Image (cartoon, helix red, strand yellow):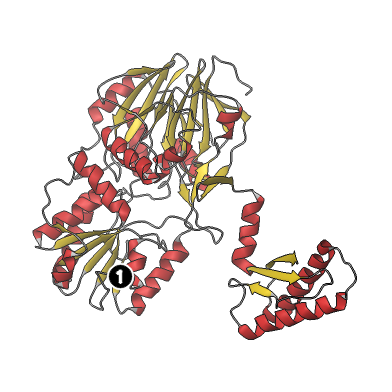
Amino acid sequence: MRFSKSELIFLPLGGSGEIGMNCNLYHYDGSWIMIDLGVMFGNSLISPNELILPSINFILENDIKLDALILTHAHEDHIGAVPYLYDKLQNVPIFTTAFTASVLKRKFLSVGSQPAKINLLDYNKIISIGKFEVQIFALTHSIPEPNAIILKTKKGNIFHTGDWKIDPDPLVGEPINENKLEGIKNEGINVMICDSTNVFNENPSGSESEVREVFRQIFLKNKKGKIIVTCFASNIARLETILKVSEDLNKLCVFLGRSIHRIYESAIENKYLENFKNIISEKESKIISDDELVLICTGSQGEQNAALTKLVEGNNKYIHLNKNDLIIFSSREIPGNEGKINVLKEKILKKDCVYIDHRMQKVHVSGHPSKQELKKMYEWVSPDALIPVHGEYRHLKEQVNFSKSCGVNKQLLIQNGDVIEIDKGSIKKKDKVFTGRDMLKGKNLIPLNDQFFKNLKFVNSDGEIFVNLILDLENNLLNEPIIFCPTVTNNEFLIKEIKNQIEDEIIKFGKKFIDDNIMTDEIKRNVKKFVNKNIGLKPLTYIEIVRI
């Protein structure tokens, strides 16, 4: 680390130059604070359903003891990595608000861990953590209790926005308190670290109240068949909208998907969604007319194991899709998931069902700020300098350029690993540290550049062949070759031909002693050559020789 103990440093380990996996470090006078520790989901052929976590090697290799982990809100890309990395972070004290704490406790339990002790933050209180003074400020987003984090030091005051938008009528929670923001502005904000996700949108992101009215009209129009809504489980305002419109129109709601049930429990625990009496179980729905049913389910991103995909593929034992049913995709497409979502939509159409998404009607509004909202926040906070985060490089660059046009004095375009020194309104890149990604495979965290994933890439594209040979000491086959190759071919004739090729190869070796490694390499070469010629694939090939 090439900076002194007294310097105020901002260092993103994730979420700057990408969407998701947010992880940000702040250092001052020997104290370290982390804000958010999230995941992103695999969106490639390599491993589409696994969690990807930010590498924390920088922290571990420098033996850094964090004073706190502060969580801005309960979305997966901000809290999802906590249960998997908590032990490595030496049981760092966690600080957040009540709803996020409730969701996080259930995440610990879902992965088989005991929940960590979580310290609850008060909106009206400034606390000291290490050498920082910390205060939270309530914003609006698509989940309850989204908070900006205000860090105060002698070297400068920082306004870290987390995720936000301006919703004048959020339906769940309160609108942004402009008067309190005025007080923060008067104290002076030297640097604003700001969400960039929706920067290319010129118009306001929209209010949940607008979505509610669109849902009401859709429900009134579609009187025949079930209405199925898929959305992000954590979008409590959207769940509230669906439950409210359904209740007003005498419809019953069913939750499909474990994550929706967990979020609902957290909502009830924190006095959200507690007055609805129109929620029934999957089993109870069997005796309810389709015309009276609304299903609220996970799977808006086309996930293979999510509730919507199972329903469309006929794998729900209580509920079946019928041709009068309407499916509403009430969410945005996360970049990289377009292909999976389109495949799912095709399956829906083949069932003679109809779907609606946000391109057709306003069934979703973004939880992130457009240009108009960003401009308003610049005016409210009046920062000396801006550092955009939470976006791909193009998003960050666009916000840099836009903030200049809005009169913000200084900007800095950064990426993960950039070490940023802050001194009042002065911001500069000081160094660069290694950042990486780890994928959760089972219970193991494996770096994405590991040979394992290079092998996995081949497996997904060209498959694997396993060959087991039982020989005596004179190279006689004691049984026909055993071949296992479901990722290459199920053609019995081709598999028999591969066996014949191997048997012929062994006969050519004769009875003289041949090193098993040489024999293995020769058989492997011929099997791969045969498969490539007949199937056009180059699979990973494994030969095991057992001598008896």
Above or below residue 440? Residue 484 is below
- Left or right: residue 126 versus residue 291 is right
- Left or right: residue 392 versus residue 96 is right
Q: Residue at x 22, y 77 (%)?
A: 324
- Left or right: residue 513 versus residue 524 is right
Q: Identify the element where label 1 is drawn.
A: strand
Q: Which residue is mark 1?
A: 355
Instruction: Give the image location of residue 219, x and y in percent.
Output: 17, 65
Can see residue 232?
no
Number of numbered discs overlaid on the protein picture: 1
Can see residue 295?
yes
Name the residue type under label 1. Tyr
Q: Residues within 10 Å of mark 1 (few under 14, many from 20)?
A: some
Foreground pick, 201 / 281 = 281
Q: Residue at x 22, y 38 (%)?
A: 175
Instruction: Give the image location of residue 221, x and y in percent.
Output: 16, 70
Above or below residue 405? Residue 4 is above
Foreground pick, 450 / 236 = 450
Task: Name the quadrant of the C terminus.
Answer: bottom right
Foreground pick, 538 / 173 = 538
Q: Quadrant of residue 505?
A: bottom right
Q: Residue at x 55, y 27 (%)?
A: 420
Task: Name the quadrant of the N terminus.
Answer: top right
Which residue reaches farthest bottom?
A: 493
Above or below residue 517? Residue 108 is above
Instruction: Give the image location of residue 40, x and y in percent.
Output: 47, 48
Which residue reaches farthest right?
A: 512
Q: Residue at x 28, y 47 (%)?
A: 263
Instruction: Give the image location of residue 498, x and y in percent.
Output: 71, 79
